[in-house]
């Protein structure tokens, strides 16, 4: 007997198809829309005439269901219709997908993947909750403010910090960083005033968001004439972004004075700003306002005056360590000398230190001249810098000439001490010829054969040309000017030739005795 054939294995149930992956939420919604209209799709695909009788009946019932016309029928007919729909498994047609709009970055929400859309919805729910909490915080503050009839209220630091963090999170969820002041509950009572460049501005400045926001709040507090500690914080923030904004400095000053803020504390802060902004004029104007305000309160206290003098000089030394020729610092130093009456030995010694480190620092030479020849102890009030002052003591003039002489030996080709010598001689009413022998230490003219020439300083040669012109030694003056133009200062040859022309006209020596005012 033949063995029985083995039974065929039972068919295994087919594994369900994996869920379809949709590239976008728009594709998913469209697929769901079409899936709810299978008989509409069938009709559009095959054509109504090619449908079977049962398919046509199902399509008709689908249309009744979609249009809702069945709701106008009697109760018994409606019941029978719904039973037929269930038997034919006709799904309830979904409405046409609506436009989901765009997110806060302008992206169409329908272009999200289903996973991305789920994350988007989650963020929106979080945002909604945070906004509700933030709104409740504002409402509580407003109620408290009304209860106190508009007077300021103080929230606990914990509440403030919670709300600040809440707003930061709102900004993160929105994908847009919330502004510093927009996110700070302490500024909720201020409505910022935006920049108005006018319609169709040709050159609107592209401010950063941070700067534009801060300036909007500054305009608002200025319009309200608010002077408060938070205004100082605001101006400090703006100055950190733009230290050259003079309006901010002026309003900061008015706020400081209104609050009677400690001047020494403000000076310490200004020191830091100045060291970071070497070429800024507004800082020094602000500093003068501070000193003008402080001085009357300490003018009768020599100890306080000395302490201020020392601290200011130490600070300026720090500035000069970075740039020894900073015009703004030198201008301020001249103001300070007048304000605190610093026509003293300490000031001169301080300048000498700078000149020892750089004998070519013309700014330091100019300041020394100012300190020496503007001292009210012996100078004529209102005497011009280039005018002879008969009150200048001879020993002062001798001291300054000696100081400048020493500097010329150190650097003969440095013009600054030579100009200084000329200025001292003018102030003391002395002739240039009084230092002829000194200048000749740096110059030896060539003999008639052209030998023996030795010029170590073109400035000494220029000085001697003026001396010899004053003494009517025209030939020697002409030789000096010719050497300057042909050899030692050829870049200004036209100037030296012009000077030689004055010699020929017999006016060079006469011009040396004239003041600037006489010439003009």
Image (spheres, rainbow, N blue to C red):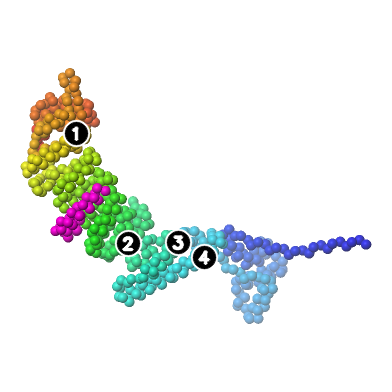
Q: Which badge, 3 or 1, is on the more N-terminal residue?
A: 3
Instruction: Determine which residue is flagged by label 2.
Output: 217
* Outermost residue, left side: 390
Cα–Cα gap, marks 2 and 3 = 22 Å
Cα–Cα gap, marks 1 and 4 = 83 Å
Question: Residue 208's spot in the image, x, y percent?
Answer: 37, 55
Answer whether labels 2 and 3 touch (C-beta < 8 Å): no
* Outermost residue, front side: 303
Question: Toward the viewer: 122 or 396?
Answer: 396
Instruction: Determine which residue is flagged by label 4.
Output: 121
At 22% from the left edge and 40% from the top edge, which residue is drawn? 356
* Outermost residue, right side: 1
At 22% from the left edge and 31% from the top edge, which residue is drawn? 492
Instruction: Determine which residue is flagged by label 3.
Output: 172
Instruction: Determine which residue is flagged by label 1.
Output: 409
Q: Residues within 10 Å of mark 1 (few under 14, many from 20)?
A: few
Q: Quadrant location of residue 231? A: bottom left
Q: Which badge, 2 or 3, is on the more N-terminal residue?
A: 3
Q: Which badge, 1 or 4, is on the more N-terminal residue?
A: 4
Would residue 356 be found to the left or right of residue 11 on screen?
left
Cα–Cα gap, marks 3 and 1 = 69 Å
The kind of secondary structure element at disc 2 is helix
The question of residue 317 being in magenta is answered with yes
Q: Which residues, given as a range, are shown in magenta?
A: 291-318
Q: Is 277 rendered above or below residue 65? A: above
Q: Nearer the viewer, mark 3 or mark 1?
A: 1
The kind of secondary structure element at disc 3 is helix
């Amino acid at each position: 007997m033949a063995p029985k054939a083995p039974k065929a294995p039972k068919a295994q149930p087919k594994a369900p198809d994996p869920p379809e992956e949709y590239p976008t939420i728009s594709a998913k919604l469209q697929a769901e829309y079409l899936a709810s209209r299978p008989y509409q799709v069938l009709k559009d695909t095959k054509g109504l005439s090619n449908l079977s009788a049962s398919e046509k009946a199902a399509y008709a019932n689908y249309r009744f269901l979609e249009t809702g016309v069945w709701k106008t029928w009697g109760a018994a007919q409606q019941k029978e219709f719904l039973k037929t729909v269930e038997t034919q498994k006709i799904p309830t047609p979904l409405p046409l997908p609506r436009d989901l709009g765009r997110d806060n970055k302008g992206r169409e929400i329908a272009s999200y993947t289903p996973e991305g859309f789920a994350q988007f919805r989650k963020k929106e729910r979080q945002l909604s909750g945070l906004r509700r909490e933030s709104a409740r915080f504002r409402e509580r503050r407003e109620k408290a403010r009304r209860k106190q009839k508009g007077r300021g209220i103080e929230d606990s630091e914990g509440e403030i910090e919670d709300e600040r963090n809440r707003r930061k999170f709102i900004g993160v969820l929105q994908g847009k960083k919330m502004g510093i002041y927009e996110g700070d509950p302490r500024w909720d009572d201020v409505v910022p005033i935006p920049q108005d460049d006018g319609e169709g501005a040709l050159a609107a400045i592209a401010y950063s968001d941070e700067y534009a926001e801060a300036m909007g709040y500054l305009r608002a507090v200025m319009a309200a004439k608010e002077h408060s500690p938070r205004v100082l914080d605001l101006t400090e923030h703006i100055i950190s972004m733009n230290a050259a904004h003079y309006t901010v400095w002026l309003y900061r000053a008015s706020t400081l004075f209104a609050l009677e803020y400690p001047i020494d504390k403000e000076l310490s802060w200004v020191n830091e700003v100045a060291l970071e902004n070497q070429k800024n004029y507004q800082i020094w104007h602000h500093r003068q306002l501070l000193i003008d305000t402080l001085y009357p309160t300490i003018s009768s206290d020599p100890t306080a005056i000395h302490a201020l003098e020392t601290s200011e000089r130490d600070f300026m030394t720090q500035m000069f360590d970075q740039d020894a020729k900073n015009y703004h610092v030198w201008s301020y130093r001249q103001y300070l000398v007048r304000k605190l009456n610093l026509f003293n030995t300490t000031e001169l010694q301080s300048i000498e230190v700078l000149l020892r480190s750089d004998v070519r620092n013309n700014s330091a030479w100019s300041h020394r001249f100012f300190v020496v020849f503007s001292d009210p102890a012996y100078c004529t009030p209102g005497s011009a810098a280039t005018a002879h002052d008969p009150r200048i003591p001879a020993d002062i003039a001798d001291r300054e000439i000696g100081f400048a002489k020493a500097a010329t030996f150190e650097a003969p080709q440095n013009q600054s001490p030579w100009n200084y010598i000329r200025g001292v001689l003018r102030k003391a009413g002395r002739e240039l010829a009084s230092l002829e022998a000194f200048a000749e230490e740096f110059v030896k003219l060539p003999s008639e054969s052209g030998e023996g020439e030795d010029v170590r300083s073109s400035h000494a040669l220029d000085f001697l040309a003026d001396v010899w012109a004053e003494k009517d030694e025209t030939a020697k003056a002409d030789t000096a000017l010719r050497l300057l133009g042909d050899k030692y200062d050829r870049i200004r040859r036209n100037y030296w030739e012009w000077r030689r022309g004055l010699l020929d006209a017999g006016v060079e020596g006469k011009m040396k005795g004239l003041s600037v005012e006489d010439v003009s």
